[in-house]
Image (tube, helix red, strand yellow):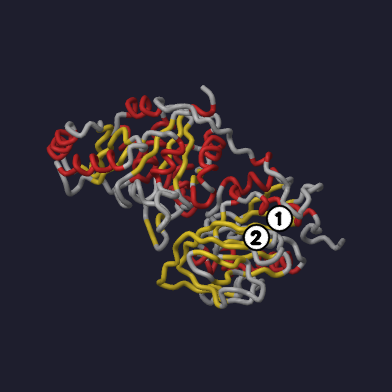
Amino acid sequence: MSGGSIPRLVIAAPSSGAGKTTVATGLMAAFAEAGLVVSPHKVGPDYIDPGYHSLATGRPGRNLDAYLCGPERIAPLFLHGAAGADLALVEGVMGLFDGASGMGELSSTAQVAKLLRAPVVLVVDASSQSRSVAALVHGFASWDPEVRLAGVILNKVGSDRHEQLLREAMDSSGVPVLGALRRDGRAGTPSRHLGLVPVAERRAEAVESVGELAARVRAGCDLQALLALAHTVPELPDAAWDPAAEPAPPGGAAATAKPLIAVAGGAAFTFSYAEHAELLAAAGAEVAPFDPLRDEQLPPGTQGLVIGGGFPEMYAPDLSANAPLRAEVAALAASGAPVSAECAGLLYLSRSLDGKPMCGVLPAESRMTERLTLGYREAVALRDNALAAAGTRVRGHEFHRTVLEPGAGADPAWGLTHPERRLEGFVSGGVHASYLHVHWAAEPSLAGRLVASAAQTAPAGSTVR
């Protein structure tokens, strides 16, 4: 089997809340427990669902976002992530045809399914309908003839009689029923202000939940029929994305040394795309993870720092209590070493979060609010910095309920250009800090530039310049 013909399915739904994550994660776990190597993927920018996918399969959960990365990179990124797999499962986002606001099908599950030439299995919340389910499925199956809606999994079915009525209605739709799952809250995953609670915060309970999901799926779905459907795909003509093939950043030579770049992780910093670490390594860095909740020092020899997104607001007292690490981060930033901070990282570098002292790198205070800031953004780098050359244009995503005051420094990280125009974030010395989440696979020069800058920086704690 060639890489381009990897068996694959897209798990979609008519709307959010139908049970996509439940079914997709359960399928991933069930097939993995059956001995298959399963490659997990998620449409859209979401970081949390891929954590559950990774737990279910033992492989990195990877995102496929056509807005952030461009439609032309979807198949290559998929092939890169799915290399060596027996089966790839792609969980959709929102409703099947919902994409970036005002931009047609861009970044929708339907668009990704077409780019991957993959059949779609629709998860339908059947809790409040019987015969109407056939009309709903017929509408979705006929809306876009380029989308191959090849099966349905009925979710939240109330009883044997209810299932019988649903199956009888679906007999006339021409779309096969590949599973029926009863209402069951036992295998649920808890949610809070930005969605599901990440795996890293509840690992033992998450392992149990994923196991229960796998058992439910095995009992209620026709796994053999689903696997046979996944094998009906054509070969993709694209070449797999290769981080090592990305060129050096314009205006910045590739690193000749092997600088050590520390990457924050642990329960407070769970938002990261797998391709970022791969790009850093391909650009010549040694990547060293650390946990700001537990580690009192940066990894020895740190020359650069990446602090991604997550939930620091849930751990502000603990992050604040780790004063030795906060002091090390502040000292590294003051030395001019490159520091890339996104969202949670931005808050961690501020003076305080909800009144708790943070690293004090940025002249700003941060706090939780009730207001959700959510959406895709387009931005441009206004001046050269450790992450981006002046004029670099990126697409990103904001997703937070915190505010930073002020929201931008004297030298902003980005000038947002769409859907609104404003200045955002901070550039100071080697620090680049912003609310904007950017997928570096769309602009690999960001990783290359960061590594090149780190290679020119003395290791943390060094007295030699």
Residue name at image x 62 percent, y 65 percent: 433
Q: Is residue 424 visible?
A: yes
Measuring from the top left, give residue 62's x and y in whole percent.
51, 44
Q: Quick one: SS at disc 1?
A: helix
Give the crowd class for mark 1: few <14, some 14-19, many >=20 residues within 10 Å: many
Earlier-in-chain disc, 2 versus 1: 2
Q: Which mark is residue 360?
A: none
Between 279 and 191, the one nearer to me in the picture: 279
Residue 219 higher or lower than 275, as above or below: above
Q: Quick one: SS at disc 2?
A: strand
Q: Which mark is residue 450?
A: 1
Measuring from the top left, give residue 354's x and y in whole percent.
51, 74
Measuring from the top left, give residue 272's x and y in whole percent.
55, 52
Q: How many marks?
A: 2
Q: Which mark is residue 340?
A: 2
- Measure the C-alpha gap from mark 2 to mark 1: 8 Å
Measuring from the top left, give residue 49's x and y in whole percent.
44, 48
Q: Hey, what amino acid is under mark 1?
A: Leu
Residue 463 higher or lower than 262, as above or below: below
Picture quarter with the C terminus: bottom right
Between 373 and 32, the one nearer to me in the picture: 373
Residue name at image x 47 percent, y 37 percent: 57
Q: Is residue 118 left or right of residue 138?
A: right
Residue name at image x 31 percent, y 50 percent: 15
**Which residue reaches farthest right?**
464
Q: Is residue 301 visible?
A: no
* Tag 2–tag 1 contact (CB < 8 Å): yes
Give the crowd class for mark 2: few <14, some 14-19, many >=20 residues within 10 Å: many
